[in-house]
Image (cartoon, rainbow, N blue to C red):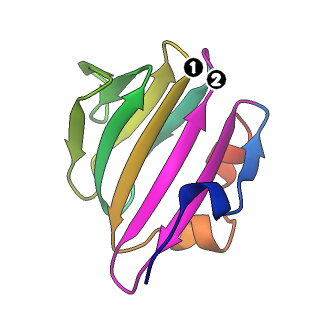
Amino acid sequence: MWYCWADMPKEQVSEQLSRRLITGERMMLAHVYLKKGCVVPKHAHENEQFTYILEGALRFLIGADGAEEVVVRAGEVLHLPSNVPHEAHALEDTLDVDVFSPPRQDWLNKTDAYLRRT
């Protein structure tokens, strides 16, 4: 199957966050667009995650207490194992590619209320 990001529907999740999704049977690829100042509240999920920053920068607070801080910039990748609590703050207007395995069912069925409040 062949895809073109520009042809994929762009979902406006909140005022500061939108995304495009490509989903396979066992993986999901997402373009996530975050405006500077956008906060993705602390959450965790069973899905293993890679976040690859194409443009901009995100500051992640990782762990139950958010004690581990990592700034990920263009050209860098962050790996988040399954069930690790994390939150993200957009330091700039940012475009990232998120890869999830398995696909995020809460994103597909739009039950991701933690994102829709941002």
Residue 40 percent coordinates (x, y): 54, 34
Please say whether residue 20 is one of the residues in the magenta stretch: yes
What amino acid is found at the position of numbered circle 1 in the picture?
Answer: Asp
Quadrant of the frame with the N terminus: bottom left
Residue 38 placement (x, y as % from top left)? 62, 24
Residues at marks 1 and 2 touching, judged by CB atoms closer than 8 Å: yes
In the rendered view, would you say 117 is above or below 8? above
x, y percentage for residue 113?
69, 53
Relative to 114, say whether 57 is above or below.
Answer: above
For image coordinates 48% across by 56% down, the residue present is 30
The picture places residue 7, in percent across and down from the top left corner, at: 66, 63
Would residue 118 be found to the left or right of residue 49 on screen? right
Q: Which residue type does callout 2 highlight?
A: Lys
Verify whether residue 21 appears in magenta. Answer: yes
- How many neighbours does mark 1 have within 10 angstroms: few (below 14), some (14-19), or many (20 or more)? some
| Residue 33, picture quadrant | top right
Tag 2, which secondary structure?
Answer: loop
Return the disc, 1 or 2, that comes first in the chain's sequence.
2
Between the residue at mark 1 and the residue at mark 2, the CA separation in whole angstroms equals: 4 Å
What range is drawn magenta here? 16-37
Q: Residue at x 60, y 16 (%)?
A: 36
Mark 1 element type: loop
Q: Is residue 109 left or right of residue 89?
A: right
Residue bearing mark 1? 93
Q: Nearer the viewer, residue 44 or 88?
A: 88
- Quarter of the image where the C terminus is located: top right
Please count the marks in the image.
2
What's the magenta bit mostly, secondary-structure-wise? strand
Q: Residue at x 32, y 24 (%)?
A: 74
Q: Which mark is residue 35?
A: 2
Q: Is residue 115 above or below residue 40?
A: below
